[in-house]
Image: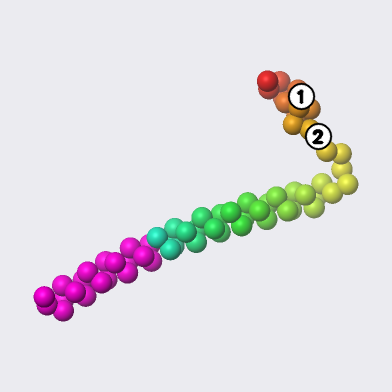
Amino acid sequence: MSSAVVNKTSFKREQKYVTQRIAELREELENLIDYLDLLEARALNFGKQRYSTEQVKKVLGIK
């Protein structure tokens, strides 16, 4: 087998790994951003009245 074929196979395998890892990192980043949004909301609403799920559903007319 020529080295060009081996290098091409190795490159494709490495490319697939890098692509998968980038997708995993993007998902992790999205989760971290969502968590940051949650922390910010909690900080902004600290000490304010909280509402139960049932209260929110009643106000919105959701069953």
Q: Is residue 19 above or below residue 51?
A: below
Under circle 2, the secondary element is: loop
Residue 56: % across, % down: 75, 29
At x 47% / y 59%, what residue is drawn?
24
Q: Which numbered circle lies on residue 50?
A: none
At x 84% / y 49%, what residue is drawn?
46
Residue 43: % across, % down: 80, 52
Residue corresponding to mark 2: 51
Would residue 9 be counted in the magenta stretch? yes
Disc 1 from disc 2: Cα separation: 10 Å
Q: Report how many numbered discs are placed on residues in the image.
A: 2
Query: Which residue is outermost to the left?
Result: 1
Residue 42: % across, % down: 77, 49
Of circles 1 and 2, the one toward us is: 2
Report whether 11 appears left or right of 44: left
Quadrant position of residue 22: bottom left
Residue corresponding to mark 1: 59
Residue type pointed to by label 2: Tyr
Quadrant position of residue 62: top right
The image quadrant where one finds the C terminus is top right
Q: Which residues are magenta?
A: 1-19
Would residue 58 be counted in the magenta stretch? no
Q: Is residue 63 above or below residue 12?
A: above
Circles 1 and 2: CB distance less than 8 Å? yes
Instruction: Return the residue nearer the eye: 41 or 7.
Output: 7
Residue type pointed to by label 1: Val
At x 22% / y 69%, what residue is drawn?
9
Quadrant position of residue 58: top right
Q: Quick one: label 2, few (<14), some, or many (20+) residues within 10 Å?
A: few
Q: Is residue 38 above or below residue 4?
A: above
